[in-house]
Image (cartoon, grey):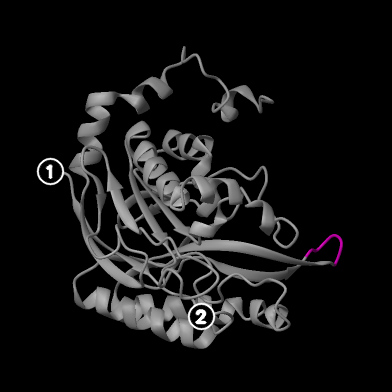
Amino acid sequence: MMAPTYKIAVIQLHPEPMQIESNYCKAARFIKDAAAKGAQLAVLPEYHLTNWIPNHPQASDIYSQWEIYLNKYRALAKEQSICIVPGTIVERHEDPATKEQQLLNAAYFIDNKGKILGRYQKKNLWHPERPYLTSSTHEPHEVIETPLGPVGLLICWDLAFPEAFRELILAGARIIIIPTFWTLSDCSPYGLAVNPRSEALFLESTIAARTFENTCAVVFVNAGGRVGSSKLNYAGLSRVAVPFLGALGDETKDSCEEGMSVVDLDMRHVEEAEANYQVRADLAREDWHYVYPRREKMGRTKL
């Protein structure tokens, strides 16, 4: 049987700080345009509704509205008959044990009928996030069965951890979707002095490596803007990456500006990569020598 081709919209949105309603409205316009172009899936960046200003005086109230906007995306997915990963939405919850307030950074997969098929809470927090966000820590990475086949969700700094990808492909993921808020100024002063585009190099190199070493497609969607338009230098570079070809998405893959690419993802590239490299086949062997990913059989091994 022929491998399917999926049309995916990567929406490199510029999130205005704490302007939740106007950011949603802009995102909805992009999604409607994507649906009109025949896209089956639209993906937005991390923090696309609010930007990342956790100490903003209105942050707590705004983060309490998370469910309103999740339901808006569910209604929009049904109305436009398109699957949506609405980037990430920061959720304010009360810890049932301690009664303390917690902030969770979560990504959802919503199908084209408006049903939530899966949710992922960010596990690997970037160190400036750790005073504010609660990690999913030891919860397993779970694969979601979707109209585009088995999908895994990761978020931003998860990209730096190959273990996350391994866990997902061991569970059968063929597409891994990564909403991201990654800027050029995330680099240290030393790194920026050596190479002002060091973070772009990090992203381009790592995404290419992940798609080859896991024989999967990677849908990477970052925030956009204009370099120098604020104190943050938006990296952009949103793309769909596949083995053999690398980055797809002409409007965004080499750009830092807000925009959208609609990409045809031919899953034959993924199938042929596995036939060639046999990464999944090796990982599935009972005598495979790296045991640490096999948590379901071996228990957690401390590294």
Magenta segment, which residues? Answer: 95-99
Residue at the far right in the pictured view: 98
Q: How many marks?
A: 2
Q: Which residue is mark 1?
A: 2
- Please provide percent x and percent y for residue 97: 84, 60
The earlier-in-sequence mark between 2 and 1 is 1
Above or below for 50 versus 103: below
Q: Which residue is mark 2?
A: 16
- Compute the Cα span from label 2 to label 1: 43 Å
Above or below for 132 versus 192: below
Q: Amino acid at mark 2?
A: Glu
In this view, the residue in front, 69 or 52, is 52
Is residue 155 at least partly visible in the picture? Answer: no
For the residues carrying marks 2 and 1, which lies nearer the camera in this image?
2
Is residue 131 at least partly visible in the picture? Answer: yes
Q: Amino acid at mark 1?
A: Met
Mark 1 residue element: loop
Category of crowding for the residue at label 1, using alpha-carbon neighbours closer than 10 angstroms: few (below 14), some (14–19), many (at least 20): few
Category of crowding for the residue at label 2, using alpha-carbon neighbours closer than 10 angstroms: few (below 14), some (14–19), many (at least 20): some
Q: Residue at x 30, y 55 (%)?
A: 148
Q: Quadrant of the N terminus?
A: top left
Q: Residue at x 55, y 20 (%)?
A: 291
Answer whether residue 72 is magenta in the image: no
In this view, the residue in front, 154 or 78, is 154
Q: Residue at x 40, y 78 (%)?
A: 27
> Secondary structure of the magenta portion, mostly?
loop
Above or below for 233 versus 214: below
Answer whether residue 98 is magenta in the image: yes
The answer to whether mark 2 and mark 1 are in CB contact below 8 A is no
